[in-house]
Image: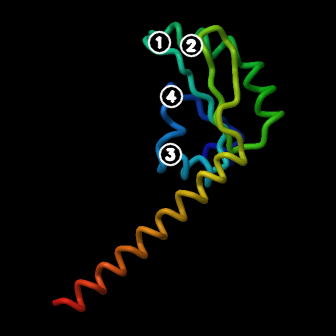
């Protein structure tokens, strides 16, 4: 696993913190994630931006407990988007929602059985 090796995740998926499955994967893996949020960049531009923020990324990972999601902007600004506590809170909400869905499915199946 990436985070167990001390690696970070670099992505250009600016919606990564909005997808429940991705949030679960990041929270469980304890991954530090950096996402490039500037759209319509070619490969050379992305490489230049990522290589220009290497020291900022290193400093950022030292000062923030994973899992977290930080955004990297075209001007080489790096800002925290979702911190450790926010991701874990989202994970709990997602888990709670899945439990409620399972409970509703169970109740519906019981009602169907009663009226069958």
Mark 1 to mark 4 CA distance (whole Å): 16 Å
- Residue 60, image x, y percentages: 77, 28
Q: Within the image, what quadrant is residue 10 found in?
A: top right
Closest to the observer, 47 or 80: 80
Residue where numbered disc 3 is placed: 22
Q: Nearer the viewer, mark 3 or mark 1?
A: 3
Q: Secondary structure at mark 4?
A: loop
Count of numbered badges drawn on the protein? 4
**Left or right of 34: which side holds 103?**
left
Q: Nearer the viewer, mark 4 or mark 2?
A: 4
Instruction: Decide: few, some or many residues near mark 1? Use Cα within 10 Å; few <14, some 14-19, many ≥20.
Output: few
Q: Which mark is residue 14?
A: 4
Residue where numbered disc 2 is placed: 47
Labelled pair 1, 4 in contact (Cβ < 8 Å): no
Q: Secondary structure at mark 2?
A: helix
- Residue 56, image x, y percentages: 76, 20
Mark 4 to mark 3 CA distance (whole Å): 12 Å
- Residue 2, image x, y percentages: 62, 43
Labelled pair 4, 2 in contact (Cβ < 8 Å): no
**Left or right of 2: which side holds 100?**
left
Instruction: Decide: few, some or many residues near mark 4? Use Cα within 10 Å; few <14, some 14-19, many ≥20.
Output: some
| Relative height, residue 34 to residue 66 (above, below) | above
Mark 2 to mark 3 CA distance (whole Å): 24 Å
Residue for point 46% across, 10% down: 41
In primary-sequence order, the first of circles 4 and 3 is: 4
In primary-sequence order, the first of circles 4 and 2 is: 4
Residue for point 65% across, 32% down: 81
Instruction: Decide: few, some or many residues near mark 3? Use Cα within 10 Å; few <14, some 14-19, many ≥20.
Output: few
Q: Secondary structure at mark 1?
A: helix
Mark 3 to mark 1 CA distance (whole Å): 24 Å
Residue where numbered disc 1 is placed: 43
């Amino acid at each position: 696993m990436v985070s167990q090796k001390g690696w970070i995740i670099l992505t250009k998926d600016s919606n990564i913190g909005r997808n429940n499955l991705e949030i679960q994967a990041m929270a469980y893996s304890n991954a530090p994630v950096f996402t490039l949020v500037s759209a319509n960049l070619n490969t050379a531009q992305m490489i230049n931006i990522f290589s220009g923020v290497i020291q900022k990324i290193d400093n950022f990972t030292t000062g923030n407990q994973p899992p977290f999601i930080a955004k990297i902007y075209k001007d080489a600004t790096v800002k925290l988007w979702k911190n450790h506590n926010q991701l874990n809170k989202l994970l709990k909400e997602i888990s709670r929602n899945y439990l409620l869905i399972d409970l509703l499915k169970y109740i519906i199946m019981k009602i169907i059985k009663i009226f069958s």
